């Protein structure tokens, strides 16, 4: 388990790119590890919520500014789930 989250900056990118980059990052980490992703796409939060629920990952809103939102996503225990 890695204590420092992997960071992805997708500010300025629109759907589906933030979700695709999150999926790729989650495939590269172990269960219990985290990805911190910055997004400006207003639809990303809903996309992330649905995807995390479907694949058993935990989504937390980390921070929000006028320019972007940051989410911390923890990979679920089933390491086969991307």
Image (tube, rainbow, N blue to C red):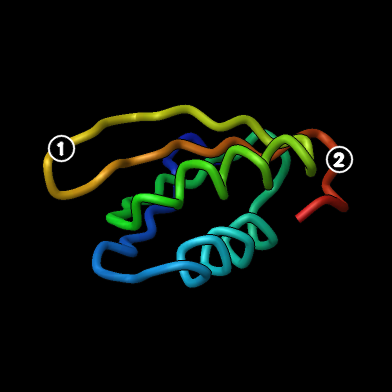
Residue 40 rendering spot, x and y as whole percentages: 28, 55
Q: Which residue is mark 1?
A: 65
The alpha-carbon separation of the residues under discs 1 and 2 comes to: 32 Å
Q: Is residue 14 left or right of residue 68?
A: right
Left or right: 81, with 70 as reference point: right
**Percent x, y for residue 56?**
77, 35
Which image quarter is the N terminus in? top right
Circles 1 and 2: CB atoms closer than 8 Å: no
Disc 1 element: loop
Q: In the rendered picture of this protein, how many numbered marks are placed on residues?
A: 2
**At 57% across and 61% down in the image, what residue appears?**
25
Q: Relative to the observer, which residue lies in front, 50 or 11?
A: 50
Mark 2: secondary structure: loop
Residue at image location 12% in from the left, 41% down from the top: 66
Q: Residues within 10 Å of mark 2 (few under 14, many from 20)?
A: few
Tell me residue 61's x, y (percent). Answer: 40, 29
Asked whether residue 70 appears in the rendered view, the answer is yes
Where residue 59 sits, quadrant-wise, is: top right
């Amino acid at each position: 388990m890695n204590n420092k989250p992997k960071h992805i900056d997708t500010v300025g990118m629109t759907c589906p790119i933030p979700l695709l980059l999150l999926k790729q990052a989650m495939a590269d980490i172990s269960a219990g590890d985290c990805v911190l992703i910055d997004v400006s796409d207003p639809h990303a939060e809903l996309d992330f919520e649905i995807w995390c629920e479907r694949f058993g990952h935990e989504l937390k809103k980390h921070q929000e500014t006028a320019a972007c939102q940051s989410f911390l996503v923890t990979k679920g225990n089933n390491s086969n789930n991307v």
